[in-house]
Image (cartoon, rainbow, N blue to C red):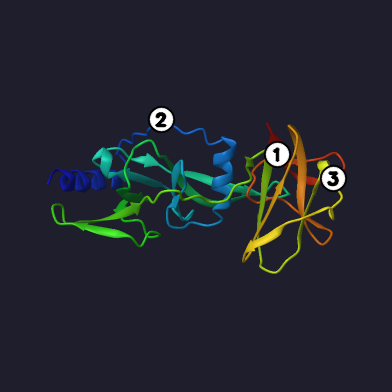
């Protein structure tokens, strides 16, 4: 009954605004690859599993969101952060709340509960729940299969892997400083409905680029690195090592 007592007492204290929060060592959220992963999640959803992280999200309508795990006996509450999207007019919009668990432990599943505006609850975005008779509570559960990935623009085999997500049936081109902004040289392949990909060999350096639908430039919405050039051009930025 230890867990149950802790949950009840913590919920009561949280409602009074006196719960003390403990956070694990922070992840470097400015990490380029992790930022790409976060920006590929366009809306709150069930946990996203990658080789390195499990990313939990919550609706931005909540003022506060936190998460507690079974392997810590639910005694540490990890606060979510807010991911904001900035448009070309520098206007920020709350996109979703998130917490990234770095996969340092060797297990294939974990149980957790969320704290949403002071209320302990299961994850409303995760349909996988289990009931614990010992504490008379439901817990959300994540199964961790091997080899699960989501797409990112990364360098592999001396090529940069570009991706674009949008409507199916489009012709998506890629142009940038490496094409002298010619939008017709490279066309992405639609590898599944709405997912377009292209592997491009690029030498080390910094490049500006956009995707093109016809002659209309489109920023890479999976890449948070952007720049506004002196001639008024908005472009995504990638650095190739």
Kind of element beneath mark 2:
loop
> Is residue 43 something one can see in this rendering?
yes
Which quarter of the figure is the C terminus placed in?
top right
Q: Residue at x 33, y 47 (%)?
A: 108
Is tag 1's residue or tag 2's residue first in the polypeptide sequence?
A: 2
- Marks 1/3: CA–CA distance: 14 Å
* Disc 1 to disc 2: CB gap under 8 Å: no
Q: Is residue 27 left or right of residue 3?
A: right
- Across and down, in percent, residue 144 comes to 37, 50
Residue 218 falls in image quadrant = bottom right
Residue at the extreme front = 157
Question: Which residue matches tag 2?
Answer: 25
Q: Is residue 145 left or right of residue 194?
A: left
Callout 3: 10 Å neighbours few (<14), some, many (20+)? Answer: few
Q: Residue at x 73, y 49 (%)?
A: 89
Q: Residue at x 12, y 47 (%)?
A: 1
Nearer to us: label 1 or label 2 = 1
Q: Residue at x 51, y 32 (%)?
A: 28
Checking the image for residue 179, the label placed there is 3
- Across and down, in percent, residue 209 comes to 77, 45
Nearer to us: label 2 or label 3 = 3
Q: In the depicted view, which residue is nearer to us: 19 or 78?
A: 78
Nearer to us: label 1 or label 3 = 3
Kind of element beneath mark 1:
strand
Question: Which residue matches tag 1?
Answer: 238
Kind of element beneath mark 3:
helix
- Marks 2/3: CA–CA distance: 42 Å
Callout 1: 10 Å neighbours few (<14), some, many (20+)? Answer: some
Is tag 2's residue or tag 3's residue first in the polypeptide sequence?
A: 2
- In the figure, 203 relative to 93: above or below? above
Q: In the depicted view, which residue is nearer to us: 8 or 124?
A: 124
- Marks 1/2: CA–CA distance: 28 Å
């Amino acid at each position: 009954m230890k867990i149950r007592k802790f949950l009840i007492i913590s919920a009561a204290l949280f409602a009074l605004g006196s719960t003390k929060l403990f956070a694990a060592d922070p992840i470097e959220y400015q990490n380029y690859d992790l930022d790409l992963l976060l920006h590929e999640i366009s809306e709150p959803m069930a946990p996203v599993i990658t080789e390195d992280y499990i990313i939990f999200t919550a609706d931005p309508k909540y003022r506060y969101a936190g998460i507690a795990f079974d392997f810590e006996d639910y005694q540490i509450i990890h606060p979510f952060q807010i991911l904001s999207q900035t448009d070309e007019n520098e206007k920020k919009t709350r996109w979703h709340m998130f917490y990234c668990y770095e996969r340092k432990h060797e297990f294939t599943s974990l149980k957790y509960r969320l704290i949403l505006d002071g209320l302990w609850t299961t994850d409303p975005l995760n349909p996988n729940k289990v009931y614990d008779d010992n504490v008379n509570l439901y817990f959300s559960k994540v199964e961790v299969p091997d080899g699960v990935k989501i797409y990112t623009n990364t360098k592999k085999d001396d090529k940069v892997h570009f991706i674009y997500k949008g409507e199916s049936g489009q012709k998506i081109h890629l142009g940038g400083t490496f094409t002298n902004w010619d939008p017709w040289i490279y066309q992405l392949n639609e590898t599944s409905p709405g997912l377009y990909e292209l592997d491009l060999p690029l030498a080390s350096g910094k490049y500006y680029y956009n995707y093109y639908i016809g002659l209309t430039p489109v920023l890479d919405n999976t890449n948070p690195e952007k720049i506004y050039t002196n001639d008024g051009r908005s472009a995504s930025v990638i650095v190739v090592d």
